[in-house]
Image (spheres, grey):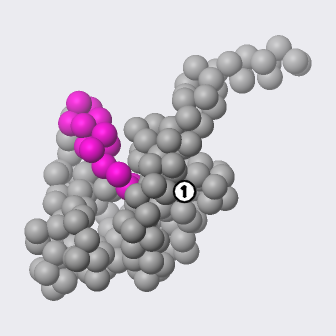
Amino acid sequence: MFVGDIIPRKGIDILIASIKNLKNYNIKLILVGDFSKNKKYFYKLKKLIKKYNLNNIVEFTGRVNNRKLQYLYNIADIYCSASRYESYGLTIQEAQYFGCAVIASNVGAAEYLLENGKLGILFKPEDAEQIEHHLKYLLENINIVKKLGKISKTRVLTQLCWDKVIEKYIKLIEKK
């Protein structure tokens, strides 16, 4: 699963290329996000999907409401962020909240959110082969997927939810 605008900096072309050799696995790549911002890129992605014969594997949902987004996160096992660059990576944290195992390019706050790889898998940006390797590993080790999802969710709930962040700020302010 991927959530975000369907634009070049999100690296969806790399993500699509990374699954071209994983057709023998029972996978579905759900791409959630607005594709009207860059129609040229969207059509490029459609061509890649056709080129790699992934029509039955890749699904674009377009923008979805919060209820549908929550449903999609809940049915996803793995979340992948293949961004070329990112300021933070809120969707990584969202995916963790819903118990998804996360693999992400090492940009923005991914290293922090995945605790240097302890809570998920990091890869070099624009490296489809690395993504493929990591996805294959997770697809063959569902116990690791479940473990990463569980420990990531626990961390988000205990340290990164707004009430916890506000609590930390209040303690910090009270010290001064």
Q: How many marks?
A: 1
Query: Which quadrant of the figure contains the N terminus?
Result: bottom left
Looking at this rendering, what residue extends furthest in the bottom direction?
51
Q: Amino acid at mark 1?
A: Gly
Name the residue that disc number 1 marks.
120
Q: Is residue 150 above or below residue 168?
A: below
Looking at this rendering, what residue extends furthest in the right direction?
176
Query: Which quadrant of the figure contains the C terminus?
Result: top right
Q: Position of residue 25 (x, y in %)?
A: 25, 71
Label 1 neighbour load within 10 Å: few <14, some 14-19, many 20+: many
Please name the residue shown 20% across and 45% down the image. 63
Q: Nearer the viewer, residue 37 or 97?
A: 97
The reply to whether residue 85 is in sight is no
Q: Is residue 39 left or right of residue 143?
A: left
What kind of element bears circle 1? loop
Please name the residue shown 83% across and 14% down the image. 174
Q: Position of residue 52 (x, y in %)?
A: 19, 83
Q: Nearer the viewer, residue 108 or 69?
A: 69
Please name the residue shown 80% across and 22% down the image. 172
In the image, residue 166 lies in the stretch drawn in magenta: no
The reply to whether residue 139 is in sight is yes
Q: Is residue 26 above or below residue 48?
A: above
Q: Is residue 166 above or below residue 138?
A: above
| Helix, strand or loop for the magenta stretch, by majority | helix
Q: Nearer the viewer, residue 47 or 69?
A: 69
Q: Position of residue 87 (x, y in %)?
A: 54, 53
Question: Which residues, given as a range, are shown in magenta?
Answer: 66-79
Q: Is residue 74 left or right of residue 110?
A: left
Please name the residue shown 33% across and 56% down the image. 2
Q: Is residue 43 left or right of residue 22?
A: left
Residue 117 is drawn in which quadrant?
A: bottom right
